[in-house]
Image: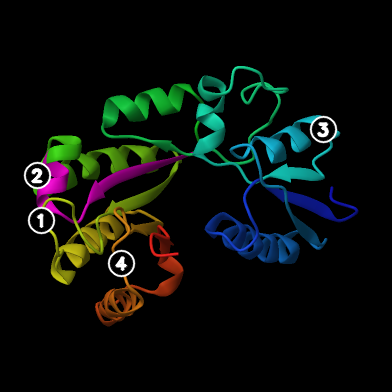
Amino acid sequence: WPTRPVTLVVPFPAGGTTDVLARALAERLTQALGQTVIVESKPGAGATLGADLVAKSRPDGYTLLMGAVHHTIATSVYKKLNYDFQKSFAPITTVALVPNVRGLDAATRAGMREVAIFMAASQTHNHKNINKSTEEALRTYRAVVSEALARGMRVRGYISCVYGCPYEGTVSLGSVLEVCHAMLEMGVYELSLGDTIGVGTPRQVEYVFRGLMRSGIELPQVAVHFHDTRG
């Protein structure tokens, strides 16, 4: 496997964020697998049409689903679905968010090979969201990441409120860099920078990325998460 092209079904409209990410992923997979990975858009019904298509396909690894959070909550929104998200699909990659060592233990018992830590670049958002200051969160995650790496897991870092905070407004580049460098020093292999409330602009993104590169962080170490709030 594979001996022929693979289809990656995107249950969202073409040109959207998930579709763009899927096409970038398909390009990488094509290079890695030596077979063409075709992106097929199948939007509709809250992303359930595409999921239904994949669920009904042959379980031979040639029809993949670009899943999203929509699919995990679909069973509570739609009373009648022709598939069971837990039983109809075999995960290729799964990642568990772990807030502490107790969460890491649960992820270990579940057989996770990769976990993710999460916090904000904003002090107030950290207090509101995870009930810790930035310093307390970093201290907790140092223990989590150290233990995860000792167990042979990969660790990804999610940083929210990079371009703005619902409580503080503007978030300084210095705050972003502090969390980024602290996570990388722990052993996180990749940083995901989130525009949590959708206020980021192209100029802000350029400003942040130039700051990252000037501080020694390389682009392959960074992923981004945006919200298209302006159409």
| Residue that numbered label 3 is attached to | 59
Q: CA distance from mark 4 to mark 2?
A: 24 Å
Q: Quadrant of residue 193?
A: bottom left
Residue 168 tag number: 1
Residue 133 tag number: 2
Q: Which residue is most to the right?
A: 3
Q: Please, what is the three-letter code of the amino acid marked with disc 3?
A: Pro
**Vertical order, 76 against 146 (above or below):** above
Q: CA distance from mark 2 to mark 1?
A: 14 Å
Residue range corresponding to the magenta coloring: 114-127
Q: CA distance from mark 3 to mark 1?
A: 48 Å
What residue sits 14% from the left and 69% below the top?
Answer: 174
Q: In the rendered structure, does residue 124 fall within the stretch colored magenta?
A: yes
Q: Please, what is the three-letter code of the amino acid marked with disc 2?
A: Ser
Q: Please, what is the three-letter code of the amino acid marked with disc 1?
A: Glu
| Residue that numbered label 4 is attached to | 200
Q: Please, what is the three-letter code of the amino acid marked with disc 4?
A: Gly
Crowding around mark 3 (Cα neighbors within 10 Å: few <14, some 14 to 19, many 20+) is few
Q: CA distance from mark 1 to mark 4?
A: 15 Å
Crowding around mark 2 (Cα neighbors within 10 Å: few <14, some 14 to 19, many 20+) is some
**In front: 218, or 164?**
164
Q: In the rendered structure, does residue 48 fall within the stretch colored magenta?
A: no
